[in-house]
Image: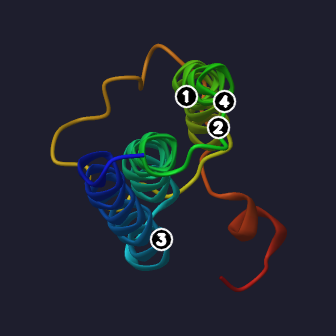
Amino acid sequence: MDQISIIAGLVFMTGGVLLVLIAGIGVYRLPDAFQRMHSSTKAGTLGTVLTIIGSLLAAEQIAPTTAIVTILFMLVTVPVAAQLLGRAAYVSGATIARLVRPDPLEHVVEREDAPLEERLGKKV
């Protein structure tokens, strides 16, 4: 393994780990479920893909087909799961922290009037 591929692998892995860290901070700090989900899916997926590419470049033991299949699996499943979770959160009445314009789904999708915590009388 030559030095250039090892250095490139370390750069990719460092970038990937930083993106996963940013995703984690976003999940912790963002105010509502929709923004947290956006942070975890976008930055988390890209960070994971970069980390896999970096480990593929830096290590000889990893099979390229395994890395490619893993990346494709992430790119196909994470957006679908995020869309389904977002729809479930919306339908269940999850709080939307910052809605700058009128709700575009107001007359399209039925939505609960209040979040589950409020309907059950629990403190958030």
Of marks 1 and 3, the one in the foreground: 1
Circles 3 and 2 in contact, beta carbons < 8 Å: no
Mark sitting earlier along the chain (1/3): 3
Q: Which residue is mark 1?
A: 71
Q: Is residue 5 left or right of residue 52?
A: left
Q: CA distance from mark 3 to mark 2?
A: 18 Å
Circles 4 and 3 in contact, beta carbons < 8 Å: no
Q: CA distance from mark 1 to mark 3?
A: 20 Å
Going by the numbered disc 4, the residue's amino acid type is: Ala
Mark sitting earlier along the chain (4/3): 3
Q: CA distance from mark 1 to mark 2?
A: 21 Å
Mark sitting earlier along the chain (1/2): 1
Residue farthest to the bottom? 123
Q: Which residue is mark 2?
A: 85
Going by the numbered disc 2, the residue's amino acid type is: Leu
Q: Nearer the viewer, residue 58 or 71?
A: 58
